[in-house]
């Protein structure tokens, strides 16, 4: 019985560790989207209008590395 309890606790710890890591991986992209939408909102409210250039500027500002990619997401050398 004691060995079964240790095994159950070990498996539970492993499962919870994996779940915590998965949660951390999901939260950061959600924060990036929030920052992007905030940037878009500020740009629209500042000018009173909104353009594709504003959206692209916010995208490049929030998602680092976007400036180094072409329209299809491939790295520009």
Image: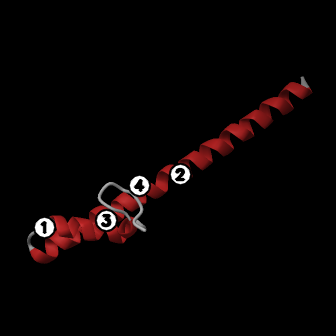
Determine whether 23 is above or below 1 in the image: below
Q: Nearer the viewer, residue 37 or 3?
A: 37
Task: State the separation of the CA atoms marked 2 and 4.
Answer: 9 Å
Q: Are marks 2 and 1 in contact (CB under 8 Å)?
A: no
Q: Is residue 23 left or right of residue 55?
A: right
The tally of labels here is: 4
> Closer to the N terminus: mark 2 or mark 4?
2
Residue 15 location, x and y as percent?
68, 37
Residue 25 is tagged as 2
Task: Tell me if mark 2 has few (under 14), some (14-19) or many (20+) residues whose alpha carbon lies within 10 angstroms of its own.
Answer: few
Task: Tell me if mark 3 has few (under 14), some (14-19) or many (20+) residues whose alpha carbon lies within 10 angstroms of its own.
Answer: many
Task: State the separation of the CA atoms marked 2 and 1.
Answer: 31 Å
- Residue tagged by mark 1? 50
Residue 71 location, x and y as percent?
29, 58
- Residue tagged by mark 3? 59
Mark 3 or 2: the one toward you: 3
Q: Are marks 3 and 1 in contact (CB under 8 Å)?
A: no
> Closer to the N terminus: mark 2 or mark 1?
2
The answer to whether residue 71 of the structure is visible from this angle is yes
Task: State the separation of the CA atoms marked 3 and 4.
Answer: 14 Å
How is this picture coloured? Answer: secondary structure
Residue pictured at 13% horizontal, 66% vertical: 51
> Closer to the N terminus: mark 3 or mark 4?
4
The residue tagged with tag 4: helix, strand or loop? helix
The residue tagged with tag 2: helix, strand or loop? helix
The answer to whether residue 63 of the structure is visible from this angle is no
> Closer to the N terminus: mark 3 or mark 2?
2
- Residue tagged by mark 4? 30
Mark 3 or 4: the one toward you: 3
């Amino acid at each position: 019985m004691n060995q079964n309890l240790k095994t159950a606790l070990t498996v539970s710890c492993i499962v919870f560790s994996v779940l915590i890591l998965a949660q951390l991986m999901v939260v950061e992209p959600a924060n990036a989207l929030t920052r992007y939408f905030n940037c878009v909102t500020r740009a629209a409210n500042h000018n009173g209008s909104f353009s594709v250039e504003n959206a692209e500027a916010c995208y490049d500002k929030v998602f680092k590395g976007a400036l180094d990619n072409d329209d299809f997401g491939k790295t520009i050398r």
